[in-house]
Amino acid sequence: MKTRIITSAVALVVLALVLVLFDSVLFNLIVAAVCLLAEWEVYHAFGFGRREWIVFAPLVPYTVLVMVSTMPAAWAVLLPCSLLVALYLCVCLLWRHAELDFARMSGVVCFSGLVILCFYSLVYLKHLLPMEQYGSDAIYFILLILGMAWGGDSAAYFTGRFLGKHKLAPVVSPHKTVEGAIGEVFGSMLLAVVITAIYEQIGGLYSLMFSGVGITWRTYLFIAVMGAIGSGLGILGDLFASVVKRQQGIKDYGKIFPGHGGILDRFDSVMFIAPFVTLAVTLLFYRVAQ
C-alpha cells in the first residue's frame, strides 16, 4: 500500500508538470510517448519480441503523426499514411507468414487502435478548446476524465473491500464485485461534481471557465450524468484489459509504476472514458449544459 501511495503521488506531480506544457507541442509529444509505451505493452502482451520488431516499427512514426495531426500539415498526410501502415502490415504477414500469427497481429492492431483513440482524445480536446478562446476548459476536461477513471477505481476498491459480496465477473476479474461497481458509479459522479465545483471557484477568479459563460445547475447535472456513464465505460475498459491479460497469461502489462503495474494497468479504465467525454463535449456540452 505504501508503494502504491508513493507512486501515485509521484505520478500526480509528473501530471502537473505535463499540464504546465499543455499549450505547446511538447504536450502532444509527451502524450505520444506515453501512448507508445502503452502500445509496447500491448505488443509484449501478445507474445511479440525482438524478432518481430517489424510489427511494432510502423506504430512509432504513426502514433507521433496522429498526436500532432491537429496541425494542418500532419492532418493532410494522415489518411495516406494510415493506408500505408495497413498495407505494410499486410505485406509483413505475407512475407513472414511462417512466423507471424494473424490472430496475434490482429490483437495488437485492435488494442493499439483503442489505445491511440484514447490518447488522441486528450490531444483533440486541446485542439477543440484553444486556451485563447476557452481558457482552461480543455485542462478541466482532461482532469475530469482522469478523475472519473481513477477516482472511480478507488471508490470501487474501497467499496468492494468493505461491502463486496457478489462477484461481478468471477472468471475475468475475480476481485471485482457488484457492490464495488456501484461504488465506482457513485464515486465517479461525486468526484466529477467536486472537480467541477473546484474549477468553478478557481476558474471564476480568473474568468477562465467555460469561455467566461459560467457554471449553472444544468452543468452539474450534465457532469453527474456523464460521470455515471463514464464509470460504466471505465468498468468495461478495465474488464476488457483484464480478459486480454487472462487470455495471454500475464498478471500486469508492465512494471513502470511500482505497485500499480504498467501504463495500461493505469489507463485501462481511461480507454473508453476519454473518447466518450471528448465526444460529449464536442456534440453536447456547450449546447446543453449551460
Image (cartoon, helix red, strand yellow):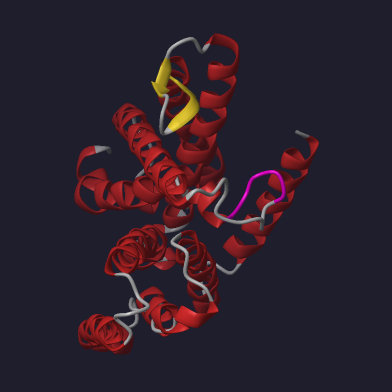
Residue 29 magenta = no
Residue 261 magenta = yes
Picture quadrant of residue 161: top right
Residue found at x 69% / y 45%: 8
Is 162 rendered above or below residue 278? above
Q: Give the farthest residue toward the front.
A: 98
Quarter placement of the N terminus: top right
Q: Which residues are magenta?
A: 258-262
Give the percent coordinates (x, y) of residue 13: 70, 54
Nearer to us in this view, 99 or 140: 99
Give the percent coordinates (x, y) of residue 92: 30, 85
**Main secondary structure found in the magenta portion:** loop
Residue found at x 58% / y 61%: 19
Quarter placement of the C terminus: top left
Give the percent coordinates (x, y) of residue 188: 45, 30
Q: Could you tell me if residue 207 is visible in this image?
A: no
Nearer to us in this view, 10 or 131: 10
Nearer to us in this view, 58 or 77: 58
Query: How many dots with numbers?
Result: 0
Residue found at x 48% / y 9%: 165
**Left or right: 193 as drawn, with respect to 30:** left
**Left or right: 99 as drawn, with respect to 206:** left
Give the percent coordinates (x, y) of residue 267: 49, 50
Q: Could you tell me if residue 165 is visible in this image?
A: yes
Residue found at x 57% / y 49%: 252
Picture quadrant of residue 131: bottom left
Nearer to us in this view, 124 or 62: 62
Is 32 rendered above or below residue 203? below
